[in-house]
Image (cartoon, rainbow, N blue to C red):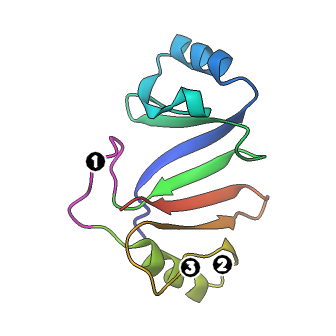
């Protein structure tokens, strides 16, 4: 199962302090909009998202159709197909993508310990 680019989406209390901290660890701006309280940062192949006031817990994020530079992949498994495969394996979905739609969509699941996983296709 190919899930696409991986990142950790962190819920933060102060995005400016968090940005400064992760810059000290070698992370650099890679996208987002700090004025909207979200920022994507990268250190080599490691990607983190900083999100202030957007969700309660940290989230493991996968982006079908993208590589680690947010560049489109030539071929990938559509988010609706991934959702179908997981349902067939008995994985309970927290939210679902509309299977009759095309293009951008997402669904969420949780692992056995309650860690949220977002499968988020942007194209």
> Can you tell which mark lies on residue 86?
3
**Residue beneath the point at 60% across and 50% down:** 60
* Neighbourhood count class around disc 3 (C-alpha, 10 Å): few under 14, some 14–19, many 20 upward: some
**Is residue 67 shown in magenta?**
yes
* Closer to the camera in the image, 79 or 88: 79
Would residue 89 appear left or right of 76 to someone viewing this image?
right
State the separation of the CA atoms marked 1 and 2.
Answer: 29 Å
Between residue 75 and residue 97, name the one nearer to us.
97
Magenta part of the protein: which range? 66-75
Image mark for residue 10: none
Mark 3 lies on a secondary structure that is helix
Residue occupied by mark 1: 71
Cα separation between marks 3 and 2: 5 Å
Check contact, mark 3 vs mark 2: CB within 8 A. Answer: yes
Task: Mark 3 or mark 2: name the one nearer the start of the chain.
Answer: 3
CA separation in Å, label 1 and label 3: 25 Å
Majority SS type along the magenta span: loop
Q: Which residue is mark 2?
A: 91
**Of the residues tagged 1 and 3, which is closer to the observer?**
1
Residue 11 is left or right of residue 6, and the answer is right
* Vertical placement of residue 67 versus 36, above or below: below
The percent position of residue 35, horizontal first and vertical second, equals 57, 27
């Amino acid at each position: 199962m190919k899930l696409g680019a991986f990142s950790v989406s962190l819920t933060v209390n102060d995005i400016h302090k968090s940005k400064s901290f992760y810059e000290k660890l070698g992370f650099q701006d890679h996208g987002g909009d700090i004025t909207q309280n979200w920022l994507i940062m990268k250190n080599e192949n490691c990607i983190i998202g900083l999100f202030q006031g957007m969700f309660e817990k940290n989230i493991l994020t996968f982006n079908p159709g993208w590589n680690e530079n947010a560049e489109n992949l030539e071929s990938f498994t559509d988010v609706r197909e991934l959702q179908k495969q997981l349902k067939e394996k008995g994985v309970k979905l927290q939210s679902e993508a509309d299977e009759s739609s095309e293009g951008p969509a997402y669904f969420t699941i949780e692992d056995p310990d309650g860690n949220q996983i977002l499968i988020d296709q942007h194209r």
